[in-house]
Image: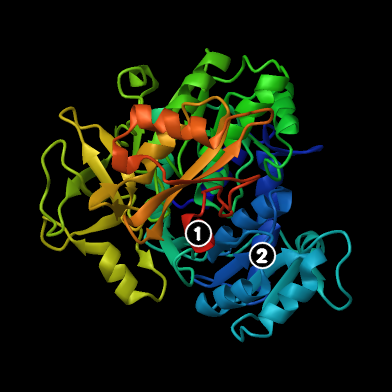
Amino acid sequence: MLVHDYLRGAAQVLPHKVALIAGRERLTFGDLDAASDRLAMALQRSGIGRGDRVAVMLENGPDMVISLWGVLKAGAVFVPLHHATKEDKLAFVLADAEAAALIAPAALHQRAQSAVAQAPSVRTVLFSGATVPEGATGLTDAIATAQPNPVDPGLIDQDLCVIIYTSGSTGRPKGVMMTHANIGHNTWSISTYLGNVPDDVVLCVLPLSFDYGLFQVLTGARVGFTVVLERSFAFPAEAMARIAEHRVTGVPGVPTIFATMLQVLARETWDLSSVRYLTNTAAALPPAHIRRLRAILPGARIFSMFGLTECTRVSYLEPERLETKITSVGRPMPNTEAYVVDDRGKRLPAGEIGELVVRGSSVMRGYWRRPEATARALRDGELPGEKVLYTGDLFWMDADGDLYFVGRKDDVFKCRGEKVAPKEIENVLYELDAVAEAAIVGVPDDIDGMAVKAFVVLRDGGDVSEQALRRHCRGRLEPHLVPKHFEFCATLPKTDSGKITRTALRAAG
């Protein structure tokens, strides 16, 4: 089964059911199916076909969703980009992916046209928006004038479905290649352990350029549930209002979203009784946040998960085990195996820290046009001919088989000769009600080699001194883990997906 067959199937069985709510707009599965058929035909008419890459740089909204399905129905590969992608990165991705087409906001037409001029592979450009540049083709017009019968491109599930470019925090971004089979496995596995049903209504404030956000739409079509799509979480009170208004049952987020959500819910009240589950990935959810969320939303099940773009999702902790395993991200999702290895690739026993390795149908095909990077990430497994994913993340596993995130290998540093895992210190800082966000990095120090520095964002109305923070840490941590330096910030730098960027903090020192 191909990924766009999810939409076709939903449109046949539930043609009049609302699939997407975006502001005042409501589109049924039938609406999405018809519009994306026409876009697929328009793309094919312009020469786009099987295996061609189509970059889509749009904010969350109906046009982004229609573009997703239209690109796939044309037989092409969907390359999502954040709607605010800068010109140099856009030009790089277009050239690197050898994109045949670009769909971009009309408001950013100058940026798009400048980038396209640096990418000779691009032969089709469509602009989304009410006002299209003179001489350019509008997405709405392309859909309206095309026939609703695209040609079957003859794909199989081993063909590429999406290429998602990583944030590039360690250099030029890399394109993660996922096949239709990869996406199919992941949507099945995730919806299975979440228990998704057609009656679900899922709020998505995550960018669809981020795999976590994209999978809300993909899974919605597979299961037949409604997605309430917000442009962002920039106005959290409005997002809370949407939950109440549409009786949302599922809320996916990342730690920074839940930290903000907790601040808003401390000031105002909405009827959130419809929420039956919350999910978290991208970074570990601090135990203090889990406890506060459970207190505010006692009827919601909280799924603490771990994932990465290279395999979408790795593990989840059943909500019923939160009390006894609150710092764990659980066990591998259905049809996936994960284990911890040493520097030689040998499996480690329970309790020992090493690199997390993932095997299964969720694992990416590789990095687009990056054979060396692919070889570092995908290595020989224990079975002849098998490749497994070396994640670059440090974990340990307990005797029950539950996984515990320690940190990125690049984030761990030594202070006074002892290893420092930032997450351990951050979790202690989050125990204080006044702390909204915290990030730990190592900074050069003449005495300690690397000293521990804490960047802290306080909650609205929060009041805590550096001395109080240090005193709290001394009571909970070993001496070498207590931050030597504290810096209070209004915000912390983040990626488009909401992850705190330690690289930028280290550079700020």
Residue at (61% x, 83% y) in the render: 119
* Residue 192 visible within the image: no
Residue 326 position within the rendered picture, expressed as x and y whole percent measured from the top left: 36, 25
* Residue 328 visible within the image: yes
Near mark 1 (Cα within 10 A), the count class, few <14, some 14-19 or many ≥20, is few
> Residue 437 lies in what quarter of the image?
top right
- Horizontally, residue 441 falls left or right of residue 497, namely left
Q: Nearer the viewer, mark 1 or mark 2?
A: 1
Residue 169 position within the rendered picture, expressed as x and y whole percent measured from the top left: 48, 63
Q: Which residue is under mark 1?
A: 509
| Residue 126 higher or lower than 83, as above or below | below
Q: Residue 358 or 170: which is nearer the viewer?
A: 170
- Horizontally, residue 242 falls left or right of residue 349, namely right
Label 1 vs label 2: CA separation? 52 Å
Amino acid type, label 1: Gly
How many numbered circles are shown?
Answer: 2
Residue at (69% x, 61% y) in the render: 84
- Horizontally, residue 294 falls left or right of residue 179, namely right
> Residue 345 lies in what quarter of the image?
bottom left
Q: Residue 310 or 188: which is nearer the viewer?
A: 310
Residue at (86% x, 68% y) in the render: 132
| Residue 182 higher or lower than 278, as above or below | below
| Residue 508 higher or lower than 65, as above or below | below
Q: Which mark is residue 41?
A: 2
Amino acid type, label 2: Met
- For mark 2, give the secondary structure: helix
